[in-house]
Image (cartoon, helix red, strand yellow):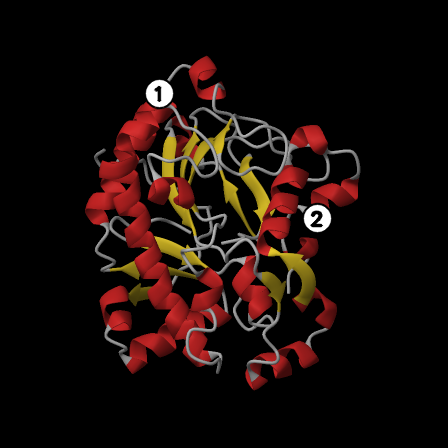
Amino acid sequence: MPVPVYPPLPDNVPTHPLVVIDYELIRARDPIEIERLWEAATSLGFWYLMNHGADKEVNDMFDLGAKYMALPFDEKMEFTQGQGGSNFGYKHLASIQIDPSGTRDANEYFNIAQDDAFSYPSVTHRTYPTLINDAMQPVITPFTRKSVEVNNTLIDVFNDRLGLPADELGKRHDMTELSGNGAKFIRVPPNLNTGEKAVGHHTDFGSLPIPGHAICNIGDALHILSGGILRSSIHRVLTPPGDQSKFERFSIVFFFRPGNSVLLNALSKESSLIKAAVDRAVDPKVFNTGATALEWLSRRVTYRRAVNQKDPQLWTAGQGTEGKAY
């Protein structure tokens, strides 16, 4: 899938520059680059990643995503996520509530479980359409393995900077345990009202794109495990402004999460830095959820579905960090 060319942004659209981190320097444990990564992860919580070595894998995934989204709607709905806490499969347009007033989302997407990619042809979480199954080994698995490799490298850096024992974060992201990890194709259709939100404000429980660069951000799990030192920023996805709204948009995402049984509590006993951060927090209880990663994700997914909105507090509970920005 060639990189699309869009009209320029309108002059009145504000943008926020992101730090560009060189993955090859991080792999080499360059101290200056590690310091830049740490600053990005503990302040805004977002950064660009260059030299990640995944260009082919990403391009192949974009091609696959475009083919999948071109399938007839009825065919896509045969593999829907349903209305519960399952995060894998197809989600159609306008099925997620993105604000307390009831506004619906403006995108469709398809999630593929990492566990299903690694166990293929055996089924771990769910079945997939033929197009996805045929691409599981040549396209999806290579992209997933590369994404895991990059994430593990970053996790290892954060582990050291948080003053944790070796592999403390790594063992909570053990690939031998089932998890909510997965790849996602996202499509935002054209001709939407300018300024309409494609995805409401939320945090990830895992700016402007630059070709060849990945946009990375800290999710809720690392925010909680680190006692808030690593920043999971609330963000939203606006539909393209101005003339850009006439074009459809595709995104490829990989979510890297702890194993399903991992308790989402701050690692205060393992790190004096984390303990001090929790002690300083306005509300330390938010860093000791008592929930497992699976329970956390299932709650987030369930409470964001429009069909499940029975109480405004349920919508808030689906936004991450309990609907608050810390």
Relative height, residue 47 to residue 42 (above, below): above
How dense is the environment of label 2, judged by Cα within 10 Å: few (below 14), some, or many (20 and up)?
Answer: some
The quarter of the picture where residue 17 lies is bottom left
Picture coordinates of residue 97 (x, y %)? Answer: 64, 34
Q: Please indicate whether residue 61 sits to the left or right of residue 257 in the image.
A: left
Front-most of residues 178 and 111:
178
| Number of numbered callouts drawn | 2
Q: Is residue 192 left or right of residue 150?
A: right
Q: Residue at x 29, y 71 (%)?
A: 26
Circle 2/circle 1 CB separation < 8 Å: no
Relative to 11, is 297 on the left or the right?
right
- Viewport quadrant of the N terminus: top left
The quadrant in which the C terminus is found is bottom right
Q: Secondary structure at mark 2?
A: helix
Q: Please tell me whether residue 151 is drawn above or below residue 105 in the rendered image.
A: below
Residue under label 1, please give it: 70
Kindly identify the amino acid type of the residue bearing the numbered disc 1.
Ala
Q: Which is nearer the eye, 2 or 75?
A: 75
Residue 285 locus on image (x, y percent): 73, 68
Residue 122: image location, x then y, percent? 37, 36
Examine the image and state in which quarter residue 28 appears: bottom left
Q: Position of residue 138 (x, y in %)?
A: 22, 37
The residue indicated by pointer 2 is: 317
Q: Is residue 45 visible?
A: no
